[in-house]
Amino acid sequence: MSLPTRWHDLRSFTPARVALGRVGQGLPTAAHLAFQADHAAARDAVHAALDVAALRAALGPQTKLVRSAAPDRATYLRRPDLGRSLHPDHDLAPQPGCLAIVVADGLSAIATQRHAPALVEALLALMPELGPVVIATQARVALGDAVGEALQAEAVLVLLGERPGLSAFDSLGAYLTWQPRIGRSDAERNCVSNIRPAGLAVPEAARKLAWLLGEMRRLRLSGVALKDDAPDYGSSISLDST
Amino acid sequence: MIRRSSLHGCTWRFESLADLMAKASPPRSGDQLAGIAAHSASERVAAQMALADLPLSVFLSEAVVPYELCDVTRLIIDGHDSTAFVPIAHLTVGGLRDHLLACDDPGALRQGLTPEMVAAVSKIMRLQDLISVAQRCRVTTAFRNTIGLPGRLSVRLQPNHPTDDAAGIAASTLDGLLLGAGDAVIGINPATDSPQITTRLLHMLDGLIQRHAIPTQSCVLAHVTTTLRCIEEGAPVDLVFQSIGGTEATNASFGVTLSLLREAQQAALSLGRGTVGRNVMYFETGQGSALSANAHHGVDQQTIEARAYAVARAFDPLLVNSVVGFIGPEYLADGKQITRAGLEDHFCGKLLGLPMGVDVCYTNHADADQDDMDALLTLLGAAGVTYVMGVPGADDVMLSYQSTSFHDALYLRAALGLRPAPEFEAWLARMGLDGTTPEALPPGFAQGLLA
């Protein structure tokens, strides 16, 4: 690549908002409104409610529904402890040894709505033994531990919307926990993040998760001890605290 | 000690000094999450009244975190300067507030004050009090330039990249320099904390600084143990960075001890890379970090934050900043809470003698926006903040949060008549970057993109 000579040329080197121009000390109108548009999309994603009926229609009638102890979005955002607790009104029956999938809204219900059905379908094609599938609302990652405990699951895979950034508001995260029980720490999980068409595409994400699930069952553990040396299906570094 | 306070015909009871300070804290989600906040507006003011009547000497005999359990408490108590305390020894917390507002040089008290005294007085101050006192505390530090002089505002250039791509980081760095940022430090948060990546980025920034003779310093904000290893292997380390907190247990959650920080400071000093000063440490802090590590001992998050400044000042840092809106809405829920906390942190840091900057920022799940950031930025400028962050377009594409932009810093300097650090200001003038931004890059400027 030839070296740039103009300010504007810096834009080809980074996704950061460089070379935006300058009017006085401020931002040109177009750059200002582009930022506002991206922030608006992120805010709308944070506050969007999961369309549970549509999701259940996509995932199948066997899908269970649960909710966390957070009664609404405002409480959910301020009380992560409630988002990790299972509301007692569930009807989960123990299925010892199952590999449960929890599909949750997290911080972007839009991500879940858009990408979770296709990911679950791709996973079931690779690993038909997966299930049951549980939809969870106002949920944090660790709600999967409570669901897993109620099901006496061998492992739980939580799919949930990641905290929206300005560059992506529909990014899905996947968290794997071996022997999920209330009180597991984040260091005991494996994460695959940035699942969306422009990030880690659904087919690759499904293959990576299936590989990790297989390794988890072989080694009977998850977390930092399970090294993610899968064939190159994309990053598994989580930048998000959920 | 149990204390009682009556207001409007009700009496409230406070179980301990920590309880009193938590109940006296202006409302914020983190203290509510911890279950230690006041339950009503009247209880809060009753606590503030009781706190105002408390003699300052109480803070020397009653620790909010037990002395025997926490090396930060020991650092505070053992390091307290009783001679410097004499002029204010007779005061209550309320009396200290009045004294600070009336005196010309509040910074002169710094060695006589403990973080808990400073946190306590901040709880009975309004925003204008926090601004007015901080403005009169001048703190100057130096490495390759002089930071914190009156009438100056420095900027940390924060050129992060999602995959630590050196050319991408160089592009953001050049963008910032074109817009007058970078006199506090050119500081990269690496996406991956490894000695190899840190060393590569340190060499890239060192090359840029040398090639253009930029009077500033670089930093890769890796863990202190990573930076120590880079120093051992001969990498060009200007500043040692570390996140710190206000209890021993918080610091343990960050993987650091006071002796490790001392070792790192000595290692950086041994390199002798500063030209006009020997401040080699860079610390970040933030309300909520202790609670998120379950290391808060039932103490409110703002008091714990002030205690982190006692850790910082033991190492003569070049730069300290709170990352005020970064930790999330469970600790500071909205623009109002972030604004208050940002001004508290700046006030407490300055009064304790720190070169205090603030990362004026928010995440997308907090109830805040660019208008909130403009307001806090402007208030901090009025308060004499030492430096703010400069991120391309205010959008950090690695850490996924919104901070202040290079343009925001230009706005603040212009609106309040503030100038960059003098050495850096002279460099900007030599490069022709002291007025507008040229569309053509200065000669040789793009060289760093070959990294």
Image (tube, helix red, strand yellow):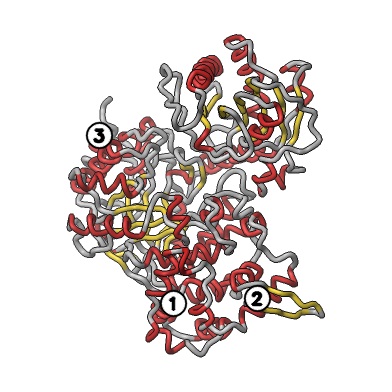
Q: CA distance from mark 3 to mark 1?
A: 44 Å
SS at mark 2 in the image: helix
Q: Which residue is mark 3?
A: B451
**Total of numbered circles in the picture?**
3
Give the number of the disc on residue B136.
1
**Lower position in the chain sequence, tag 3 or tag 2:** 2
Quadrant of the rendered image containing residue B392: top left
Amino acid bearing label 1: Arg
Residue B381, visible in the rendered structure: no
Quadrant of the rendered image containing residue B270: bottom left
- Relative placement, left or right, of B381 versus B138 is right
In percent of width and height, residue B314 lies at 35, 67
| Residue drawn at x 47%, y 69% as measured from the top left | B67
Is the same chain shared between marks 3 and 2?
yes
Q: On screen, B345 above or below A196?
A: below
Q: CA distance from mark 2 to mark 1?
A: 25 Å
Marks 2, 1: nearer the viewer: 2
- Relative placement, left or right, of B231 versus A192 is left
Give the number of the disc on residue B48.
2
User: How many other residues sit within 10 Å of disc 1, few (<14), some (14-19) or many (≥20)?
Assistant: many
**Lower position in the chain sequence, tag 3 or tag 1:** 1
- Relative placement, left or right, of B180 versus A125 is left
